[in-house]
Image (spheres, grey):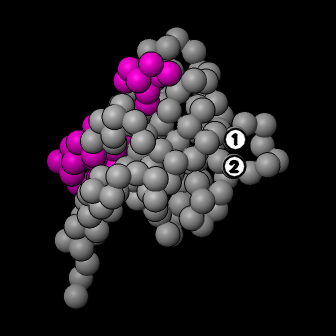
Amino acid sequence: MTKDLEAALREAIAEGERALETGDVPVGAVVLDSDGTVLGRGRNEREATGDPTAHAEVLALRAAARRRGEWRLDGCTLVVTLEPCTMCAGAVVLSRVDRVVYGARDAKAGAAGSVWDLVRDPRLNHRPEVVPPDLVPEEIADRCARLLSEFFAGRRIL
């Protein structure tokens, strides 16, 4: 894993931490261009905005497309703290990003290899490379998973 991707994962973690301020699930995302420049950032904002589509990945992809001036994000990498859900995986495919890097698996709703593998479905016309947590530095993957487990532990009723 390159230093650019490690730095982007740390930025995504920081975005996820900011989501906590509004009571949102702490997921953060960053879109990098082929040079490693950040084109877009996002964090979950469903609670903050009342928008069911305000997932970190969707917001980061929207910001990157605005900055680029087009919807095609070929040559880009989406870096996210949690494996994309089906909605976000669909947005990944439709935006044509080249690669998805994620720090924690989602055993209940993951659509990049855990529950489903929408992003690499051979029936689709675009299939980005997927870099799962096993290929992310352990310390970063652990932080991504811990951020989520601590959030949900604080919400469980005993």
User: As drawn, which residue projects farthest toward the bottom?
Assistant: 158
Counting labels gives 2
- Residue 72 drawn above or below residue 30: above
- Residue 117 drawn above or below residue 108: above
Q: Dot 2 corresponds to which residue?
A: 120
Q: Secondary structure at mark 2?
A: helix
User: As drawn, which residue projects farthest toward the right?
Assistant: 123
Residue type marked 2: Arg
Which numbered disc covers residue 127? Answer: 1
- Tell me what residue is drawn at x 50 percent, y 21 percent: 34
The N terminus: image quadrant: top left
Is residue 65 on the magenta stretch? no
User: As drawn, which residue projects farthest toward the top?
Assistant: 69
Classed neighbour count for the residue bearing mark 2: other residues with Cα under 10 Å, few (<14), some (14–19), many (≥20)? some
User: CB of mark 1 within 8 Å of CB of mark 2?
Assistant: yes
Is residue 16 on the magenta stretch? yes
Residue 40, visible in the rendered structure: yes
- Residue 143 drawn above or below residue 124: below
* Residue 11 coordinates in the image, percent (x, y): 28, 37
Q: Which residues are magenta?
A: 11-39
- Tell me what residue is drawn at x 36 percent, y 31 percent: 4
Classed neighbour count for the residue bearing mark 1: other residues with Cα under 10 Å, few (<14), some (14–19), many (≥20)? some
Residue type marked 1: Arg
Q: Is residue 124 left or right of residue 132?
A: right
